[in-house]
Image (spheres, rainbow, N blue to C red):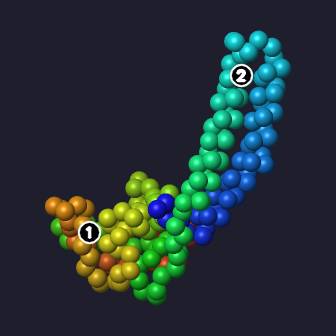
């Protein structure tokens, strides 16, 4: 259906929508009025920039509202000892013994540069629900998969925490 979001994600999106409607929209409309008052619109860069900013804000509001309408709400809790949403997981790759830490998040918060993996990604799907010591298969596609061993699970990480500090 739509994006998988936690209740926290929904609340943050609703806050952004409200801010954009009550604050950014008013500022953008005022900027357009001020730029329009400067005279000749055919060569008025400020007017076009203000209109573009206003339209981008309205577009973002529509996008966020559509996301909320089609979203699937997922639980951000998991059983004790199991990998779940917002948990930081230390894994060892079987192929080369390399150790990495990942944080399981919803797809809108996923960021591979910060080792935040979506629960919808192959590694996220493989890790979710497993325990320390489990060997899990990460199935990338029909022709390739690899194995990880879960070494540790940290359930205390806040959602904005940098996972490299584990």
- Label 1 neighbour load within 10 Å: few <14, some 14-19, many 20+: some
Q: Residues within 10 Å of mark 2 (few under 14, many from 20)?
A: some
- Where disc 2 sits, the SS reads helix
Asked whether residue 7 appears in the rendered view, the answer is yes
Place residue 32 in its image quadrant.
top right
Which SS class for mark 1? strand
Find the distance from the CA under tag 2 to the CA under tag 1: 52 Å
Say if mark 2 contacts mark 1, CB within 8 Å: no
Can I make out residue 163 in this image?
Answer: no
Which label was assigned to residue 46?
Answer: 2
Using the image as rendered, state which of residue 145 and residue 98 is in the foreground: 145
Tell me what residue is drawn at x 82 percent, y 25 percent: 34
Against 73, residue 44 (above or below) is above
Q: What residue is drawn where x is 67% and y is 54%?
A: 16
Please tell me in which quadrant of the rendered image residue 96 appears: bottom left
- Residue displayed at 78% across by 34% down: 29
Looking at the rendered structure, the number of numbered marks drawn on it comes to 2
**Residue 50, how many percent across, how many down?**
71, 29
Give the residue pinned by disc 1. Answer: 138
Of the residues under marks 2 and 1, which one precedes in the sequence? 2
Task: Say which residue appears at 48% left-offset and 82% top-offset.
Answer: 78
In percent of width and height, residue 64 lies at: 60, 52
**Up/down of 7 relative to 1, above or below:** below
């Amino acid at each position: 259906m739509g994006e998988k979001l936690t209740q926290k994600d929904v609340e943050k999106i609703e806050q952004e929508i409200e801010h954009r409607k009550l604050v950014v929209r008013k500022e953008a409309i005022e900027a357009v009025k001020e730029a329009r008052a400067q005279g000749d619109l055919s060569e008025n860069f400020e007017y076009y920039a203000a209109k573009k900013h206003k339209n981008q804000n309205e577009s973002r509001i529509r996008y966020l509202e559509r996301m909320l309408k089609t979203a699937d709400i997922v639980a951000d809790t998991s059983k004790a000892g199991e990998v779940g949403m917002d948990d930081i997981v230390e894994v060892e790759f079987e192929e080369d013994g390399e150790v990495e830490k990942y944080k399981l998040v919803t797809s809108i918060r996923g960021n591979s540069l910060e080792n935040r993996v979506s629960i919808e990604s192959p590694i996220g799907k493989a890790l979710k629900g497993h325990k320390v010591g489990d060997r899990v298969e990460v199935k990338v596609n029909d022709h390739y998969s690899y194995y990880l061993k879960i070494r540790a699970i940290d359930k205390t990480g806040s959602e904005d925490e940098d996972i490299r500090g584990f």
